[in-house]
Amino acid sequence: MTPAPLISLSPFSPILLAISWPPSAYLWFKTLHLVGVVVWFAGLFYLVRLFIYHREAETLAAPLREAFEDQYGLMERRLANIITTPGMVVAVTMAIGLLSVQPAWLHQSWMHAKLVVVALLLAYHAFCYRIMGQLQRGTCRWGARQLRALNELPTLLLVIAVMLVVFKQQFPTGAATWFLVALVVAMAASIQFYARWRRLRAERLASQEAGGAAA
Ligand code: HEM
């Protein structure tokens, strides 16, 4: 249901209140905001995964390495420019639409916290573009392991942003919240352990093959 407008004290009120939206506008903004958020996050998650594969491809032998690097570079640029950035633009534009209907939320602490989370996400988005450029130029210093750890940041920000918007002023700090934090940390740790296990297994197999060839 469309919420009843709160009394607004925002410095942007004169501009925002000047827009008179039809009654269903709020629900349309929210629908498209959620679609934008889903697309944005799908892009952010997959982009860093591609960076990890791109980095791992650097260990391959020459002709194969170049082919993989070119392919990953192309996939990264298309994913970033055709999916991730448009998703971000839709999410943010529709969020502005939501606030134009409910400008008083700009004075509430949950919205301030959400805006901080969004600022961090935008910085992360820009940072992904930076890493993408470095990978294309072959100057990236971030290893696959560090990139895997980096990929956990948007998960944490996603959980916080959704909790803020659902709980608003009643943000929970009890056992359930800590359980959720522990779950995110456990997920991050298991991804690192699995990657380590795969690397050690590949090294073991390679040394066994080298031993077999020498015998
Ligand atoms: C530009 C920054 C953003 C602003 C100003 C903003 C603002 C809002 C507003 C005003 C609502 C409506 C709340 C309601 O109707 O109760 C909303 C809904 C929502 N937002 Fe955002 N948002 C932003 C970015 C994000 C991001 C980055 C995420 C996800 C990580 C997100 C997730 C959601 C979700 C899941 C809802 C639906 C909540 C519900 O219906 O209970 N938003 N947002």
Image (spheres, rainbow, N blue to C red):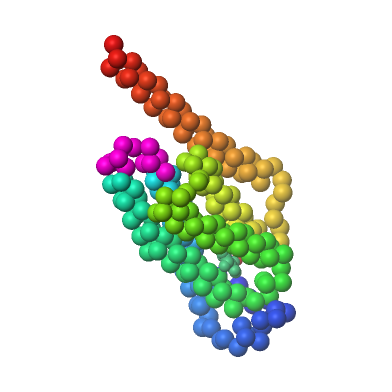
Is residue 107 visible to us here? yes
Extreme residue in the top direction = 215
Q: Quadrant of residue 182?
A: top right
> How many numbered marks does the figure carry?
0
Magenta portion: prevailing SS class: helix
Q: Position of residue 76 (x, y in %)?
A: 38, 55
Q: Please give left or right for residue 14 compared with residue 126 in the image.
A: right
Please tell me whether residue 163 is drawn above or below residue 115 in the rendered image. Answer: above
> The N terminus lies in which quarter of the figure?
bottom right
Q: Quadrant of residue 57?
A: top left
> The C terminus lies in which quarter of the figure?
top left
**Image point (67%, 61%), residue name:** 113
Q: Position of residue 10 (x, y in %)?
A: 70, 79
**Image point (43%, 67%), residue name:** 86
164, 40: nearer the viewer = 40
Q: Please give left or right for residue 162 compared with residue 211 in the image.
A: right
Please tell me whether residue 36 is drawn above or below residue 98 in the rendered image. Answer: above
Q: Position of residue 2 (x, y in %)?
A: 56, 73
Name the quadrant where ligand 1 sits. Answer: bottom right
Is residue 27 visible to us here? no
81, 143: nearer the viewer = 143
100, 200: nearer the viewer = 200
Q: Is residue 58 magenta?
A: yes
- Magenta residue span: 55-65
Q: Position of residue 120 (x, y in %)?
A: 60, 59
156, 17: nearer the viewer = 156
**Image point (43%, 30%), residue name:** 199
